[in-house]
Image (cartoon, rainbow, N blue to C red):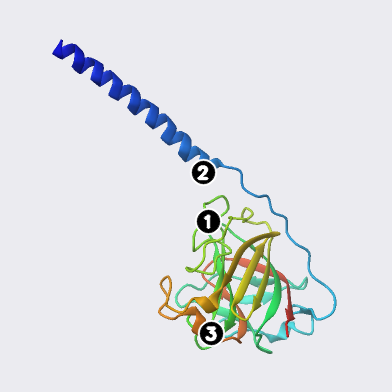
Amino acid sequence: MGKGKNILLFLIVLIVGIYIGMNFYSWLDDIFNEPIPIGEITKKPEGEGWIDLLSPENRSYWKNVTDEKNIFEIQEDGVLHIYGRSLHPLRYVGFSQRTFSDFQLHIEFKLTRRANSGVFLRSQINDPVYRGFEIQVLEDYGKLPNKNSCGAIYDITTPMYNMSFPAGQWNSYDITVQGGEVQVVMNGWLIIHTDIDKMTTPLGKFPVAYASLPKEGYLLLQDHGGEVWYRNICIKPLK
């Protein structure tokens, strides 16, 4: 009888294990294959108050603000092309004509495979990483969102969805910064809405509290060793 009970117990454990295993893989499948929003690139804004930062009269204000190395070009069609040759040190292409405080920003970008860049807001040219903040630009199509995903406030906030299109396709950001409030819309979907004024202690890997960051600075684009293109960079300062 003892041997029979052991066999029965083994069979029960085996059946339970198989059931749990099947449901575990089903659960993983649900996570990695669940439906996600389908985005659509938003149109270039026009109208009163909007400034086209890549218009012919504004193109000369874009500079490599890190050093004298040739890291980008603005093509005849108004597309800003970062060659992606920098890694050590990282370099930044900045609109040098003026600073911005509160604003709405529309910007479109496309990347090559595994490329990395970033849109830096309210940045100080001598210290863009710690005296400004970054909206991540990353080729991560199809991956689960995390605090370093495309659209994240880098290493601080996780987007609600990963809205990235595949490498080689254009994406759009519509970013609103007003006081401490930051909203990021990617390909038509709101993915970040937060208040950095509430971040009074350091978060992520940064040693500074975001609430202490300057409320005015430059718009910079990061050269992180990946080839990236930007177009239709339009900004509307807010009162």
**Which of 6 and 90 lies nearest the eye of the viewer?**
6
- Kind of residue at badge 1: Pro
Label 2 to label 3, Cα distance in Å? 40 Å
**Which of 124 and 200 lies nearest the eye of the viewer?**
200
Q: Position of residue 206 (x, y in %)?
A: 42, 76
**Which of 21 and 65 lies nearest the eye of the viewer?**
21
Q: Earlier in the sequence, mark 2 or mark 3?
A: 2
Depth check, mark 3 against mark 1: the one in front is 1
Q: Which mark is residue 32?
A: 2
**Callout 2: helix, strand or loop?**
helix
Residue on which disc 3 sits:
66
Residue drawn at point x = 57 percent, y = 42 percent: 34
Q: Position of residue 64 (x, y in %)?
A: 59, 83
Residue on which disc 1 sits:
145
Q: Residues within 10 Å of mark 3 (few under 14, many from 20)?
A: some
**Callout 1: helix, strand or loop?**
loop
Q: Residues within 10 Å of mark 1 (few under 14, many from 20)?
A: some
Farthest residue toward the left? 2
Task: Please state, as top left, top right, bottom left or bottom right, where the C terminus lies in the image.
Answer: bottom right
- Kind of residue at badge 3: Thr
Q: Is residue 24 left or right of residue 107?
A: left
